[in-house]
Image: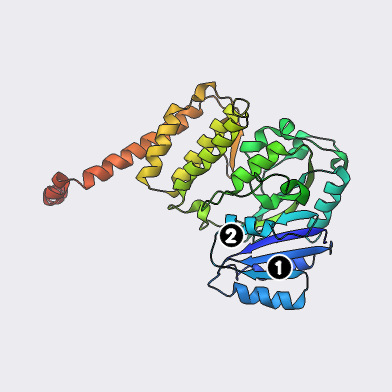
Amino acid sequence: MVEISVILPVYNSENFLRQCLDSLVNQSFKDIEILCIDDESSDGSLNILKEYEKNDERIKVISQENMGVAKTRNKALSMVNGNFTYFMDSDDYLDTNALKKLHDNIISNDSDFCIMKALFIKNGEQYKFPAFDLDKEFSGVNFNKFIFDYKDVKSHVLNDLFAPWLKMYKTEFLKSSEEFRFPEIKSYSDAPFHVKTMLKASRISFVPEYLYHYRENDDSLVHSSSNTINFFTLSDIIEDYLVKNDYFDEFKDEFEAFQTVKLVYYMGFTDSDEYFTKAKGILENLDFKSNPLILKKDSDRAEIILESDYLKECKLAIELYDCKRRVKSMEESNSWKVTKPLRKFLRH
């Protein structure tokens, strides 16, 4: 048995895959296996994986028909041999000491999983992503001897970065419940996994260092116009889980904040009538005035803070959508088409 199993789904990542793999094989912590699952890439990713597999016996390459990242991660979870499990994305990379620092912390605290921080890369520049700023919340703490659970970091359960690559998990913890699997939806599968593991872990720990380098991709599935409609499936999955497990009353404000943050954010990536109709219905029925957790956007992220007039921003988003629909409907009407020559004449 190895100590750490790294799960690396790969799909058309040839441009950045070598940097990703180099960051793994050169980790200062050596007792690892790297499970690389190629999800039927159409570029040169599989050839790169096989090249690295020949040179490092810790790398295991598995090829499969395209299944998507959720099914791929679930499949890999059944294959891990390590005492600890780490998920990674194939276009990102790790600091050389990342796995060692996570492992040392999780051992020292005997935690179910350990969280770290991330640097985001966009247009060749890196910036500190303000997710899980727990060192600010727990100032003066020795994080090598400090554990917490969701009650101590309640705002981070539904309103922070959901990505599994921010955490190293004890494999025994992940295998303790069938709940700890990624829902097999086309996008946004990270969120339910994050919520469930955060709620069920009795011992969580934290490394207050930026050890992961995330390459921001505006063309990802999350930002795809055709996939924004999947948000409603995601929202239903999380709501159903909170209700069935008696968490909903405790997280009512956080859940409403989660919905409003995401609904308004994804409006910028779609022109789908179905999306806007559903979003409008949800936003109009939320009781914003009684919710102390409200959205404010800055240049780096959508941040949940106290802001009593957020309802205005949501209403403006809905009104903008209604105006767009009315204009579109008017332009498609017969009267608009018939009077086109007259409008052209009047402009001159």
Q: What colour scheme does the image use? A: rainbow
Q: Residue at x 74, y 70 (%)?
A: 59
Q: Residues within 10 Å of mark 1 (few under 14, many from 20)?
A: many
Callout 1: helix, strand or loop? helix
Residue 32 picture location, percent across and down: 80, 63
Q: Residue at x 86, y 43 (%)?
A: 109
Q: Quadrant of residue 110?
A: top right
Q: Nearer the viewer, residue 173 or 100?
A: 173
What's under tag 1, amino acid-wise? Leu
Q: How many marks on residues? A: 2
Mark on residue 123? 2
In front: mark 1 or mark 2? 1
Mark 1 vs 2: CB contact within 8 A? no
Residue 156 picture location, percent across and down: 67, 37
30 shown above or below 326: below
Q: Is residue 321 left or right of residue 125?
A: left
Mark on residue 212? none
Callout 2: helix, strand or loop? loop
What's under tag 2, amino acid-wise? Asn
Residue 201 picture location, percent across and down: 74, 39
Q: Quadrant of residue 193?
A: top right
Mark on residue 21? 1
Q: Residue at x 69, y 36 (%)?
A: 199
Q: Is residue 300 visible?
A: no
Residue 245 picture location, percent across and down: 62, 32
Cα distance between the residues tagged 1 and 2: 21 Å
Q: Nearer the viewer, residue 69 or 144?
A: 69
1 or 2: tag closer to the N-terminus: 1
| Quadrant where the N terminus is found in the figure | bottom right
Q: Is residue 129 visible?
A: yes
Q: Residues within 10 Å of mark 2 (few under 14, many from 20)?
A: few
316 shown above or below 275: above
